[in-house]
Amino acid sequence: MTFKQDIIDALTLAYPQILTFENLASELMASQERVVQSVTELQEQNYPISTQGKDIHLAYPLLSVPAILKQLETDFIGKPVQLHARMDSTNSYAKENLTDLINGEIILAHEQTAGKGRLGRNWTSPAGASISLSLVLKSDIPFERIPLLTQLTAASLVKALDAWADVQIKWPNDIILNNKKIAGVLVETEFSGRSLNGIVIGIGINTNVDQMDIPEDLQSKATSIREEKAGETDPNKLVARFLKHFENFYVAFLGSQHTEPFLSICREQSVLIGKDYWIIDKEQKRKASIRTIDPTGGLVVTYHDTNKTEVITSSDLSIRGEHTYV
Ligand code: BTN
């Protein structure tokens, strides 16, 4: 991918300027024939590159390591960055290669062919139209505090996305815009016996996904930032903003055990709190009023059948409205 990624980098850094094949070839110190060949292959793989005669430009900016690094203001989160053209799943790759990856390193992919969602679901990531990111953490975090990382990540996404839209959180891991999902978080852990080798925070964001590329069964539940007309998303700016907010929350969380800075955002931006929902697990479906998120990151609910207030911590649950997703 390196030469093709060089083309993507040059077009992204130039965006929204239109380049010529001649400019591009001279910038990349390559022949025009080689540039034309690679651009054709990228277009065949559905990358949003428009060409007209000798002109070439992107329909919208694509992931690019130099473009992220230009805007990245973190000390260790997002350092280094790996960007791949196509992977089965960035989370699977990060877990398989954990020993070679360092604390804070991120893996990005333009496309995933077997992206994983929560509860064993699939996650669709079409080429160039979404952000697939996995962040590796190697800090020693007590087992019972790991679920808080999903809340910390969700709050970081809310802050990062506020440059484009006022998004909400559907506990535990969905990011919602106009009552539909635009992003999700999947936190996975790797253990050797009882010792934690590392944590992989997976994030999928539908930036420029077309409604028609959203799987049929998710059409009424999922959307993208572009479909909701929340403005054009530069994925590199979004990634850099996310990493900065994540680092701020994470350093406070590790150092002083501070959870309120991110949990307060999760409560304020919750789509669930103050409403009634069905809580569905493998065995049953129970109606509950959603109260708040407690200091452990659990969801506090009052079940209608027993009138008892309980904290839900298991993520093996789905939460649904009467006939709606949120
Ligand atoms: C969900 O909402 O169910 C979680 C979706 C998480 C998707 C991301 S995309 C990057 C990373 N790699 C994966 O295979 N999954 C996560």
Image (cartoon, rainbow, N blue to C red):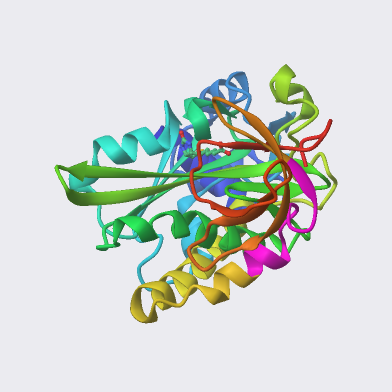
Say which residue appears at 49% left-offset and 65% top-offset. Answer: 246
Taking the image as shown, residue 34 lies to the left or right of residue 75, namely right
Q: Position of residue 214 (x, y in %)?
A: 71, 25
Residue 227 image-quadrant placement: top right
Pick whichever, 6 or 184, lies toward us. Answer: 184
Q: Position of residue 66 (x, y in %)?
A: 47, 56
Instruction: Report if residue 111 is visible in the image.
Output: no
Q: Position of residue 85 (x, y in %)?
A: 45, 33
Pick whichever, 99 or 82, lies toward us. Answer: 99
Pick whichever, 73 or 270, lies toward us. Answer: 270
Q: Magenta residues, as a range?
A: 265-277
Say which residue appears at 53% left-offset and 58% top-offset. Answer: 151
Taking the image as shown, residue 310 lies to the left or right of residue 188, namely right
Say which residue appears at 21% left-offset and 49% top-offset. Answer: 197
Say whether residue 273 is magenta. Answer: yes
Say whether residue 15 is magenta. Answer: no
Quick check: 54 above or below 176?
A: above
Instruction: Locate the N terminus by quadrant.
Output: top left
Quick check: 216 above or below 103?
A: above
Taking the image as shown, residue 93 lies to the left or right of residue 19, namely left
Instruction: Report if residue 18 is visible in the image.
Output: yes
